[in-house]
Amino acid sequence: MFNKITSWITAAFIVAGAALAAPASDTQAIQERAAEADFTIQNMALCLDANFINCITVPLVTGACVSMVGGLTGWNDSISSIHIPLGFACTFYDNLACLSSGTPDNGDSVTLQGGIYPSLVSIPGDNGVNVDFDNRVSSFLCSPATY
Ligand SMILES: *[C@@H]1O[C@H](CO)[C@@H](O)[C@H](O)[C@H]1NC(C)=O
């Protein structure tokens, strides 16, 4: 009987301890993840000239292809420098509608990680060879990095 009560009390303390500790650490973990998550709108810069001259700031959209049509028609085949926010990667295509030909592609797309690209004259192509992508971008597709 005494043993039973002791083990019940011990179990109750363990449960109580877990109940007290778990929400505290959960709350902290949630707050840390919320601090990591950036809910502000991210922008990217697409520039007509090298070294970030004559730029347009575009809200960064993930998971959807953006073609240089409509309001971006004037930027078609005209981009010479790019700033992508950290935590994102964007693939730029020579063709409209994020279309690439060949497997691996024939150098008609490049994937750039978040960062600054003051020139597109010689950058690593998705075909593994450095390509001249200056004044070639006609569409792009961005995705978020995970953490
Ligand atoms: C944009 O450039 C592509 C070639 O990269 C061309 O096929 C297309 O017609 C151009 N579109 C416009 C609207 O200028």
Image: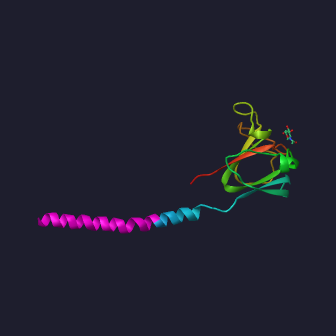
Q: In front: 56, or 128?
A: 56
Identify the magenta region.
Answer: 1-26
Residue at point 69%, 60% (across, down): 41
Display coloring: rainbow
Q: Is residue 49 visible?
A: no
Principal secondary structure, stretch drawn in magenta: helix
Direction front: furthest residue? 70
Instruction: Say left or right for 34 vs 1.
Output: right
Quadrant of residue 16 within the rendered picture: bottom left
Image coords of residue 114 (percent x, y) = 69, 53
| Quarter of the rendering occupied by the C terminus | bottom right
User: What number of labels is visible?
Assistant: 0
* Residue 131: % across, % down: 78, 40
Residue at left offset 32%, top offset 68%: 17
Residue 93: image quadrant is top right
Task: Judge from the rendering whether residue 102 lies leftward or rightward of residue 49; answer left or right.
Answer: left
* Residue 71 shows up from this direction: yes
* 98 shown above or below 33: above
